[in-house]
Image: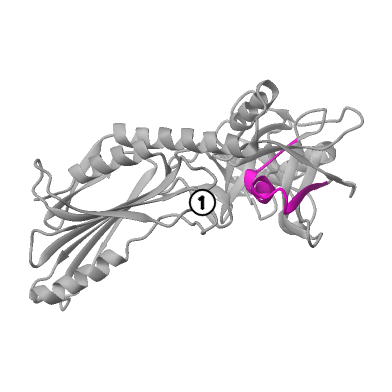
Amino acid sequence: MKHFVVFLLLMSCSKAFATEQAEEIFKQLAPSLYQIRLIDSASGEKSSIGSGFQISKDGLIATNYHVISGFALYPEKYQMQYLDHQGNKGKLTLKSVDVINDLAIVKREVEQEMDYFAIAEQNPVKGEELYSLGNPHDLGMIVVPGTYNGLKKESFNDKIHFTGSVNQGMSGGPVVNAKAEVVGVNVATSGNQIGFLVPHQKLQTLFKQLQIDPPVTIEQQMSEQLSASQDELVNALLTSPWQSKMLGNAKVPTIDVPFIRCWGNSNAEKQDAIVLSVVANCTLEENTFISSHFNTSTIEMEYQYLDAKSLPPLKFYHLYQQQIKRAGPGNKARKDDVTEYQCHHDLVMPENQTINTKSVFCTRNYKRFPQLYDVLFISGSIDKDKEALISHFTLAGVEQDSAMAFTKKFMEAIAWK
């Protein structure tokens, strides 16, 4: 009992110290913290808000790309504005973005050198106390203590797992260590004290690139970043082990990488089911935000095995058709963002496989980034009367060569037992 009381006292002292330290850090850094506002030019009202922090003496401010994405895409519709800790407002200009890691650098005009945040040289250690700063729900700047828990394991693009409350409006705010050095940037939350941060190295890289080689245009910069990232992703998938997995009486591929996660389901428990349905779905559980209605970089592979048992062939065929029609794109996009899908239908009978399929290969082009496409591929087996395999995948934001290489490997990996 004594040990338990001592433990509680130590915990209480620790929390009191953390709170005191958080208050001291906030007092020290408040002049370099900002609310970042997107103003609708027509109405003059706020369209969105986030947080930002100064990273140079001449007025450069870091934030999230998604905070200022409206201006990046539609500069004629929006203005960017900062609000400092004393209530002063001013205009911002957009200098650089990293759309893959959700970062942006904007600039305010300054008349004299200003204080700014130092970016850390070292990574935190697991369990280290960190402090997240930002403007949640437009309530004013706050500081939230939390803990560093390393990098998120299931992410293709590095994200820090932060145990602390990263709330709406804190996006783009800094996360600092006890020395007040930036170790990450608030980017997302899963609730229940689970937050995610962009590692400080990503911001450091963007900052250095801006000094050396400023982008010609933001749109060109985004285009190059999207192409490079998707090329890296698809290459990682093509060069990783593809494993064959039984799904009913069919063999389907899964890819052995930590950032692709697979789930399964079936109706095998239903004794009265007239059709046995077994489903496997593998997805990349992240995407690249371009706008609130447009995202990319998603990957999805889905398989459905059907066994009709006693169902007549004609009824089974109609059911089979209905299931095929369910397949759709894995990412959000509007007519302003992409063209209509163009589809090519074919019968595929590969020499080295035991499954013949009717396949549909569809692509739609990105209007703002014309070298990129969304790809939707669907195939249905045509070998059996009462047994079928539906396979489909979607790739978002890939170049033509990558799409064709992935499609070839996908088709060659499907077979009957």
Give me the residue at 45% from left, 42% from top: 372
Q: Residue at x 32, y 61 (%)?
A: 327
Secondary structure, mark 1, is: strand
Residue for point 39% across, 42% down: 259
In this image, 252 relative to 112: left or right?
Answer: left
Instruction: Find residue 106 and report its image quarter.
Output: top right
Taking the image as drawn, is residue 9 in sight? Answer: no
| Direction bottom: furthest residue | 272
**Residues in magenta?**
61-82
Residue 193, magenta (yes or no): no
Viewer-closest of 326 and 55: 326
Quarter of the image where one finds residue 397: top left
Across and down, in percent, residue 236 comes to 36, 33
- On screen, residue 294 versus residue 309, left or right, reads right
Q: Is residue 65 magenta?
A: yes
Q: Is residue 178 above or below residue 275?
A: above
Q: Is residue 99 visible?
A: yes
Q: Residue furthest top?
A: 212
Please state the horizontal and vertical placement of residue 334, each as a whole percent of the image.
52, 59
Give how far across and how far down residue 274 sits, in percent.
15, 76
Which amino acid, mark 1?
Answer: Asn
Q: Which residue position is annotated with label 1?
A: 295
Residue 260 horizontal side relative to residue 127, left or right: left
Residue sitting farthest toward the right: 111
Counting from the top left corner in percent of width and height, residue 43 is at: 79, 62
